[in-house]
Image (cartoon, rainbow, N blue to C red):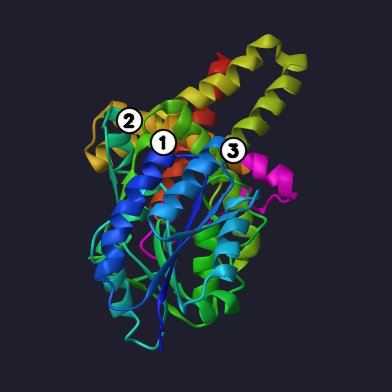
Amino acid sequence: MIDGVSILVVSRGRVKLLEELFKSLERARKECSLPTELLIVDNSDSDDAKAIEELCKAYDARYYYEASSVAIKRNRCAELAKYELLYYCDSDCIVTPNVINEHLIMYEDASVGAVSGPVILEGRENPLVKTLSETSWCNCFTQPMKHPELEWGTTANFSVLRDVFYRAGGFNTRFPNKPGGEDVDIGFRIRNVGYVIKSAPDATVYHSNKTWLSFKEVSSRLFSYGRSNVLVAISHPDRLIADINWVAILLLVSLFSLILTFVVGFIALIVPPVMFITYILVSSFEKMILSKQALWKVLLVELLSVFESFGTLAGCVKYKTLKPLYRQVMYSKFQEHGTFPDNQIKYLNLFLSLLICCVLILI
């Protein structure tokens, strides 16, 4: 039986956002049917750390300092927790009043080891964040509203039984100190030890979209996603499907073109940029036709996906593996990317791009 709920938050800076979270959690804790505690594991700079420690005193929270990665801090939270249910929430979120009770309801089923609730991005909007909200990068936040069970859940709104958490091995501390991957990894391992991850569609959390508003921040985030994808692939080889990283093909073609300059001259150097432009345009037109979205939107998404692909290349170098260049993680059974017909269209695009390049060289 669940004896209480330990609310666990890791933080760094974001003092004002953290105070908004505390205010919302204060209401949710009062509404909760079981005892609760609030733990903060923080590694802010000294001024922010002092401010957060004062916030903890005001909102009945326990403060701990841990100068380490996000995964290590989340594991530290679990070690310090005194209750059976561990509820994780991000520091830049606002929870709804009944969020904890909605999680608790799902544990009436003995097969459930973890619960995930929807995360809604809110705040100032611009064309970039509106476009991203329609992609797989953000769709994962609302999966609990669409499907009763999940393969994993985002840690912005995620609970897990303490015993299940330790059976699954906790968070993998190999993941870098940037967003992405560690929540997928622990979700897969919870499923692997025989437990269901249940959706709580009414357990809503609102997440600040501040870090999704600029091209620079999004490209950095996607690069991190690509790098973390390599660790997920290494840890879960049973969840890989055939899928080529087209940027890796582009780099091979670039190398071949450089060698080819000794045969046909510098004209060979036009192949890589032409292939890049051709692939992006052909892929964008294909997705525009299938999704019926504006060309500029699909073109933007295609360009951003290049950063994720380069992140995967960097991860392959760092973790000394080539498998993620031709195999991709199947994150969900509802996933479309990486499956038929998406893969076949990608291969056709690559073939057309190379064909056009060859014709240009011959001309």
Q: Is residue 250 above or below residue 52?
A: above
Mark 2 vs 3, N-terminal side: 3
Describe the element under mark 3 as helix, strand or loop.
Answer: helix
Q: Is residue 333 above or below residue 283?
A: below
Q: What residue span does the magenta drawing correspond to? A: 313-339
Q: Which quadrant would the C terminus be assigned to in this image?
A: top right
Q: Amino acid at mark 3?
A: Ser
Mark 1 vs 2, N-terminal side: 2
Q: Which percent across, then down, holds residue 137?
A: 40, 46
Q: What label does residue 7 carry, if any?
A: none
Which residue corresponds to mark 1?
A: 211
Mark 1 vs 3, N-terminal side: 3
The residue at 31%/35% (across/down) is: 129
Q: Dot 1, crowdedness within 10 Å: few (<14), some or many (≥20)?
A: few
Q: Which quadrant would the N terminus be assigned to in this image?
A: bottom left
Q: Is residue 74 left or right of residue 22?
A: right
Question: Which quadrant of the view contains residue 256?
Answer: top right
Describe the element under mark 2 as helix, strand or loop.
Answer: helix
Which residue corresponds to mark 2?
A: 128
Q: Amino acid at mark 1?
A: Thr
Which residue corresponds to mark 3?
A: 46
Q: Amino acid at mark 2?
A: Leu
Does the rendering let one see residue 334?
Answer: yes
C-alpha distance separating marks 1 and 3: 23 Å
